[in-house]
Image: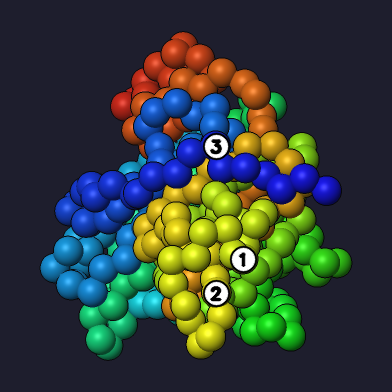
């Protein structure tokens, strides 16, 4: 077994999207190769309604899948096909835009004004770019949570983990999408398919992915309840960690524990032509998509 080293890590960057939603971009709109089959990820956690209430009014998508995971608050959605609904705490929406859809997503928050969630974009291979649009709306009660004896909690959103299948299926990228909490100072390893590319995104607490293969006693910088624990190089809230090759990911949790998304998928390895909400394989396909959007033939 070989532990995946960290290829690089960085903090999510503040930006504004939609009609004025303040969020943090985890990655996107740059070199897509380190993340293939994923294109972009946004962290839209905010506790001030005036920074997210204007939402994401009507806009098109083609050639991608969007994955929205709501931690707290609500998101109302509607589209050009007549679908509409409400995502709440712990819910998932996996939208396959395929040949084209026009939709809107309007975050509403909860009664405390909190709106916490993530949106991930997954690419579609060329032979599925023009597939029929579809939705998978998954309620939180449908998501399996696994509880380890040491207090670790693993929510299986997509993919197969320890024989448990996440409720989201039929996705081109064949993703594994886990929401993981590790208690304070615990050391854990997670299997990671060698054929996949993937990353972790920390959103609570802190953890060490860099030196996790030597979790105890390398260089003691803190004593906690009589234990000498290696706590250097901890990464905290809103840190992206991208992995190199290997068949395991190892994590040393800090003294506040750590919660993170662990996401992987099978690389598509195709050209990417991308402008705004539309992702195709060539500039000609991109021009055609925007021409159709302008002349009213975008929706198939």
In the foreground, 55 or 165: 165
Report the residue at 22% width, 64% height from top.
52
- Which residue is outermost to the left? 50
Q: Could one spot residue 47 in this view of the protein?
A: yes
For disc 1, the marked residue is 216
Circle nearer the N terminus (1, 2): 1
Residue 140 image offset from top left, x and y in percent: 58, 78
Vertical placement of residue 131 versus 138, above or below: above
Decide if residue 225 is on the left or right side of residue 112: right
Circle nearer the N terminus (3, 1): 3
For disc 2, the marked residue is 228
Circle nearer the N terminus (2, 3): 3
Residue 215 image offset from top left, x and y in percent: 62, 62
Q: Could one spot residue 122 in this view of the protein?
A: no
The label number, if any, that marks residue 7 in the structure image: 3
Report the residue at 32% width, 66% height from top.
45
Viewer-nearest of labels 3 and 1? 1
Report the residue at 71% width, 48% height from top.
3
Within the image, what quadrant is residue 159 found in? bottom right
Q: CA distance from mark 3 to mark 1?
A: 22 Å
Q: CA distance from mark 1 to mark 2?
A: 7 Å
Decide if residue 87 is on the left or right side of residue 271: left
What is the crowding at mark 1: few (fewer than 14 residues within 10 Å), some, or many (at least 20)?
some
């Amino acid at each position: 077994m070989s532990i995946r080293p960290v290829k690089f890590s960085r903090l999510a960057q503040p930006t504004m999207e939609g009609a004025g939603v303040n969020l943090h971009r985890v990655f996107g709109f740059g070199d897509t190769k380190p993340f293939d089959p994923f294109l972009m990820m946004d962290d839209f956690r905010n506790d001030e309604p005036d920074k997210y209430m204007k939402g994401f009014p009507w806009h098109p998508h083609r050639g991608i899948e969007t994955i929205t995971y709501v931690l707290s608050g609500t998101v109302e959605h509607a589209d050009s096909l007549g679908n509409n609904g409400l995502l709440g705490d712990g819910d998932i929406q996996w939208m396959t835009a395929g040949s084209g859809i026009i939709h809107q997503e309007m975050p509403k928050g909860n009664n405390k004004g909190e709106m916490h969630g993530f949106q991930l974009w997954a690419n579609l291979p060329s032979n599925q770019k023009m597939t029929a649009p579809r939705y998978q709306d998954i309620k939180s009660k449908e998501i399996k949570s696994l509880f380890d004896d040491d207090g670790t909690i693993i929510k299986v959103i997509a993919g197969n983990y320890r024989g448990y299948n996440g409720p989201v299926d039929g996705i081109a990228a064949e993703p594994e999408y886990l929401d993981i909490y590790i208690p304070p100072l615990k050391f854990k390893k997670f299997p990671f398919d060698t054929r996949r590319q993937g990353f972790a995104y920390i959103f609570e607490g802190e953890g060490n992915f860099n030196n996790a293969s030597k979790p105890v006693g390398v260089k003691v910088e803190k004593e906690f309840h009589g234990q000498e624990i290696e706590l250097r190089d901890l990464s905290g809230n809103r840190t992206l960690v991208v992995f190199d090759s290997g068949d395991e990911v190892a994590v040393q949790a800090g003294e506040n524990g750590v919660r993170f998304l662990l996401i992987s998928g099978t690389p598509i390895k195709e050209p990417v032509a991308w402008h705004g909400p539309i992702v195709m394989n060539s500039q000609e396909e991109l021009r055609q998509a925007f021409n159709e959007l302008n002349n009213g033939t975008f929706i198939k």
